[in-house]
Amino acid sequence: MFRINQAVTPSRTIIYIDGQLTKEYAQLAEQYCSESLATGKRLEVVLRDVSEVDEAGRNFLRQLAARGIPVHAKGVYMRYLLNCIRRTNKDHIALRSPSSGQ
């Protein structure tokens, strides 16, 4: 099961994701996000009742984090997963930083 909804305001778009964030659904979610970003509005993503995340889903979440798109999650595991992704992205950004000498 997968469900994606969006709420559009004059200043932002919020995309709500429920269900499985697996390969085919992660691609669909990425498409929704790309279309929303093309409008020029601020984008936020809310993971509500996400029950499964595979590698494609984690890659999608990493891309959002790398672009600085706010992602909010409900549920202990999803919040934990997002925190791990955010930490990993910060580490990679720090390694590529000109001030790090690399």
Image (spheres, rainbow, N blue to C red):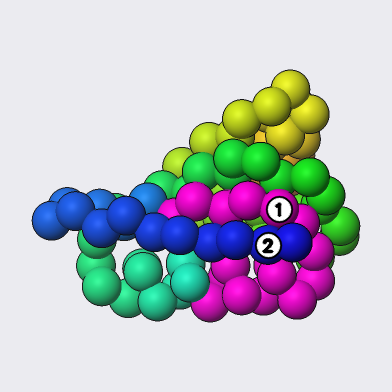
Front in this rendered view, residue 85 or 12:
12
Name above or below for residue 93 compared with residue 41.
above
Q: Could you say which is closer to the camera, residue 78 or residue 19?
A: 19
Q: Secondary structure at mark 1?
A: strand
At a point 86% along the width and 60% down the height, the residue shown is: 55
Task: Name the amino acid, label 2.
Answer: Phe
Contact, mark 2 vs mark 1 (Cβ under 8 Å)? yes
Amino acid type at mark 1? Gly
Quarter of the rendering occupied by the N terminus:
bottom right
Viewer can see residue 68: no
Residue located at (60% from left, 61% from top):
3
Q: Position of residue 61 (x, y in %)?
A: 66, 53
Residue pictured at 80% horizontal, 64% vertical: 22
Position of 21 with respect to 3 (left or right) is: right
What's the residue at 76%, 56% (across, down)?
A: 20
Circle count: 2
In the picture, the disc for residue 77 is none
User: For the view shown, which residue lies furthest in the front direction?
Assistant: 1
Q: Quadrant of residue 13?
A: bottom left
| Residue 14, magenta (yes or no) | no
Residue that numbered label 1 is attached to: 19
Specify which label sits upstream in the sequence, 2 or 1: 2
Let me know if residue 58 appears in the view.
yes
Secondary structure beneath label 2: strand
The x, y position of residue 66, in whole percent, is 58, 52
**In this rendering, would 41 be left or right of 15?**
left
Question: What is the distance, in whole Å, between disc 2 and disc 1 at their CAs?
Answer: 4 Å
Which segment is the magenta one?
A: 15-31
Q: Which residue is mark 2?
A: 2
